[in-house]
Image (tube, rainbow, N blue to C red):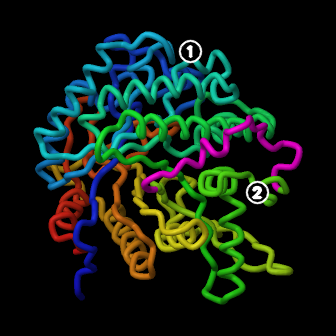
């Protein structure tokens, strides 16, 4: 069996997010985020776990980067904590927070690791949520100041920027279903408005990078597209999957790439469509340099009556990880990039998250043989390489995550890391998947 090789120059990395790993939730001037508040609501998070300590990365980042270096990881997608930089959401800058990330970026440079920085990974300052959060326009104005602040501060150290992470999760799941912070259940029009405000904020992030990023600065958005996989390769089912992909992702991808809310959007949302101000959509659709895709799972689709897409429900014993939502569907790393490219053009793509979450036992004698994760990632990457061979312009892949961390409403039980983290001692132990991924990076091939 020959190794599956990737093109020269392919970007391999790992990903993490500030609220999930940093800890130091109220240290050196940082204010509460919506997740700090949400995690303290009874029943909101498994076992009542909070982000207070997490992986203690705030104090241990240099050690963590040394571990990355040892594994040969040269690219790291991370996020900055908005409430650490601007504790009031806007207004005065917290210099201790700014200085922390300067030290972090200096450490990355010493270890030969390139940062890919996400401006916002769900940790909205609670003071802004108290004013209405993503429901209200003023949050986009606050984000504009935040984006200007961080790009001006770190433009010499950071050249790869991502504006927002997974709009669906902090809008639909934060204000619609209530399963993620801030945990509200609003009417549909309000949810659609939160989507729109997030897109306007994205536009401010792009503008900030263009104005302040300096030579070589690049910027894009990361979206967790809902991938629709044809149940087989018949033309009717492929067409149905394509149609379903547009409908499932209409609130983000259409305005992002076309600068408008289409007739399909209007048909789906009806009277609940977002209210738009003059210039919003041109602002949202400013040219970006790449699109990040967070892809874990998807849905099977077939053509129903008149070619209308029909979603096929997963049977009870369909394989999945320990995440209830994560059905194992490696084809999503083929169809996700392919459908984005077919529908919206050949913008460079990066898989900014992909991985597998399990409830894992502690290492035995320093050994953690997570074959389930290794096989999951290998199968997904095989499909990604096939998509690239068929024309999808995928330029890189970031595995989620470097180490076990705070998995949102699942607390510390669900583990995604290629490093086992003992949250009591903060000892990191490389798993089998870490050693395997190190070989993949070194050989630029699946081994």
In the rendered image, residue 279 lying in the magenta stretch gets the answer yes
Rendering coords of residue 150 (x, y %): 37, 28
Residue 8, position as x, y percentages in the image: 22, 71
- Classify mark 1: residues with Cα within 10 Å, few (<14), some (14-19) or many (20+): some
Instruction: Give the x, y percent position of residue 408.
Output: 49, 37
Q: Give the image location of residue 67, x and y in percent.
A: 15, 45
Q: Identify the residue shown where x is 72% and y is 85%.
A: 236
User: Which quadrant of the rendered structure holds the C terminus?
Assistant: bottom left
Relative to the observer, which residue lies in front, 212 or 447?
Answer: 212
Kindly check if marks 2 and 1 are in contact, taking CB atoms under 8 A apart as contact.
no
Q: Kindly identify the residue that appears in the image at 61 percent across and 87 percent down.
A: 233
Numbered badge on residue 394: none
In the picture, measured across the screen, residue 293 lies left or right of residue 79, that is right
For the residue pair 386 and 366, the one nearer the viewer reads as 386
N-term-proximal mark, 2 vs 1: 1
Residue range in magenta is 268-290
Image quadrant where one finds the N terminus? bottom left
Q: Which residue is mark 1?
A: 127
* In magenta stretch: residue 82: no
Image-based side of 35 in relation to 372, left or right = right
| Location of residue 412 with respect to 41 vertically, above or below | below
Q: How many marks?
A: 2
Asked if residue 250 is positioned above or below residue 420 in the image, the reply reads below
- Identify the residue at image location x=44%, y=25%: 82
* Mark 2 to mark 1 CA distance (whole Å): 34 Å
Residue 356 visible somewhere in the drawing: no
Compared across the picture, whether 251 is left or right of 295 comes to right
Assign a secondary structure to mark 2: loop
Q: Label 1, secondary structure: give it.
A: helix
Rate crowding at label 2 as few (under 14), some (14 to 19) or many (20 or more) other CA atoms within 10 Å.
some
Q: Which residue is mark 2?
A: 262
């Amino acid at each position: 069996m020959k190794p599956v090789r990737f093109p020269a120059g392919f970007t391999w990395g790992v990903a993490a997010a500030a609220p999930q790993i940093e800890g130091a939730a109220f240290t050196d001037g940082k204010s509460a985020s919506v997740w700090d508040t949400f995690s303290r609501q009874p029943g909101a998070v498994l076992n009542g776990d909070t982000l207070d300590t997490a992986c203690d990365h705030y104090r241990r980042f240099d050690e963590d980067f040394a571990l990355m270096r040892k594994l040969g990881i040269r690219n790291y997608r991370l996020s900055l904590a908005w409430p650490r930089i601007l504790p009031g959401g806007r207004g005065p800058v917290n210099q201790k927070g700014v200085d922390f990330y300067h030290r972090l970026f200096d450490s990355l440079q010493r270890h030969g690791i390139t940062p890919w920085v996400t401006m916002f990974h769900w940790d909205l300052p609670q003071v802004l949520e108290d004013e209405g959060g993503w429901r209200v326009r003023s949050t986009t104005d606050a984000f504009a100041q935040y984006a200007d602040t961080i790009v001006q501060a770190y433009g010499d150290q950071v050249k790869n920027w991502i504006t927002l992470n997974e709009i669906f999760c902090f809008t639909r799941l934060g204000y619609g279903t209530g399963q993620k912070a801030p945990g509200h259940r609003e009417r549909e029009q309000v949810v659609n408005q939160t989507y729109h405000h997030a897109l306007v904020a994205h536009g401010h992030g792009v503008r900030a990078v263009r104005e302040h990023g300096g030579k070589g600065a690049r910027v894009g958005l990361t979206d967790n597209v809902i991938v629709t996989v044809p149940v087989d390769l018949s033309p009717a089912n492929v067409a149905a999957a394509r149609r379903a992909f547009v409908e499932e992702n209409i609130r983000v991808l259409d305005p992002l790439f076309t600068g408008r809310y289409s007739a399909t959007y209007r048909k789906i949302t009806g009277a609940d469509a977002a209210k738009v101000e003059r210039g919003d959509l041109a602002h949202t659709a400013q040219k970006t340099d790449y699109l990040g895709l967070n892809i874990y799972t998807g849905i099977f689709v077939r053509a129903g009556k008149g070619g209308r897409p029909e979603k096929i429900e997963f049977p009870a014993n369909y394989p999945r990880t320990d995440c209830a939502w994560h059905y194992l569907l490696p084809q999503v790393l083929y169809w996700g990039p392919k459908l984005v490219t077919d529908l919206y053009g050949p913008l460079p793509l990066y898989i900014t998250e992909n991985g597998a979450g399990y409830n894992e036992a502690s290492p035995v004698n320093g050994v953690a043989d997570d074959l389930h994760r290794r096989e999951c990632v290998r199968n997904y990457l095989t499909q990604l390489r096939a998509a690239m061979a068929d024309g999808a312009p995928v330029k890189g892949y970031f595995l989620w995550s470097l180490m076990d961390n705070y998995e949102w409403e699942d607390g510390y039980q669900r583990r995604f890391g290629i490093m086992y983290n003992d949250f009591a001692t903060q000892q990191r132990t490389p798993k089998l998947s870490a050693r395997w991924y190190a070989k993949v990076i070194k050989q630029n091939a699946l081994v």
